[in-house]
Amino acid sequence: MKKSLDKAIEDYDKAKLNEVTYISRLEKENATLKKSLSKAGELIEELKQENFNLKDELETADDILTIQREEIEISRLPLNERLEHEYINKRENEDKQKKENKQC
């Protein structure tokens, strides 16, 4: 009977130790996963910012191409039409400047 009780206590101690070891391992794994998740979040934020910057650069490049296309079209027009078009653009730019100055 004493051996059975000793065996039961020993088995209980082993089970308790295994449980503590398992819980400790899970806690370490959880901490590692939290760190990985934090790093992934930082990487996502960096990628979002990079994406925003690239979109901004693309819009700027598109604006430049649009202006260049308009200039090419104007250069193909006869002289009187070019002058008229330049005058219209100049007036539009002046109007935009006046609006921007009023807003400021």
Image (tube, helix red, strand yellow):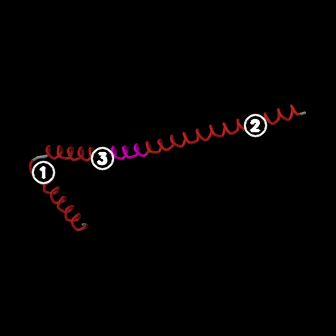
At label 1, counting other C-alpha atoms closer than 10 Å, the crowd grade (few under 14, some 14-19, many 20 or more) is few
Q: Nearer the viewer, mark 2 or mark 3?
A: 2
Q: Residue at x 16, y 57 (%)?
A: 88
Q: Residue at x 90, y 33 (%)?
A: 1
Answer with mark 2 or mark 1, whichever residue precedes in sequence. 2
- The CA distance from mark 1 to mark 3 is 29 Å
Answer with mark 2 or mark 3, whichever residue precedes in sequence. 2
> Main structural element of the magenta stretch: helix, strand or loop?
helix
- The CA distance from mark 2 to mark 3 is 68 Å
Q: Which residue is mark 1?
A: 81
Q: Residue at x 47, y 42 (%)?
A: 39
Check if mark 2's residue and mark 3's residue have beta carbons within 8 Å. Answer: no
Q: Which residue is mark 3?
A: 59
Quarter of the rendering occupied by the C terminus: bottom left
At label 3, counting other C-alpha atoms closer than 10 Å, the crowd grade (few under 14, some 14-19, many 20 or more) is few
User: Residue 68, located in which quarter of the rendered image?
Assistant: top left
Q: Say whether residue 46 is left or right of residue 17.
A: left
Counting from the top left corner in percent of width and height, residue 34 is at 54, 43
Above or below, 18 relative to 61:
above
Q: Is residue 58 magenta?
A: no
Q: Say whether residue 42 is left or right of residue 86.
A: right
Above or below, 25 relative to 64:
above
Counting from the top left corner in percent of width and height, residue 93 is at 18, 58
Q: Which residues are magenta?
A: 45-57
Q: Which residue is mark 2?
A: 13
Q: Residue at x 73, y 38 (%)?
A: 16
Answer with mark 1 or mark 3, whichever residue precedes in sequence. 3
- The CA distance from mark 2 to mark 1 is 98 Å
Residue flagged by tag 1: what amino acid is it?
Answer: Glu
Residue flagged by tag 3: what amino acid is it?
Answer: Glu
At label 2, counting other C-alpha atoms closer than 10 Å, the crowd grade (few under 14, some 14-19, many 20 or more) is few
Q: Nearer the viewer, mark 2 or mark 1?
A: 2
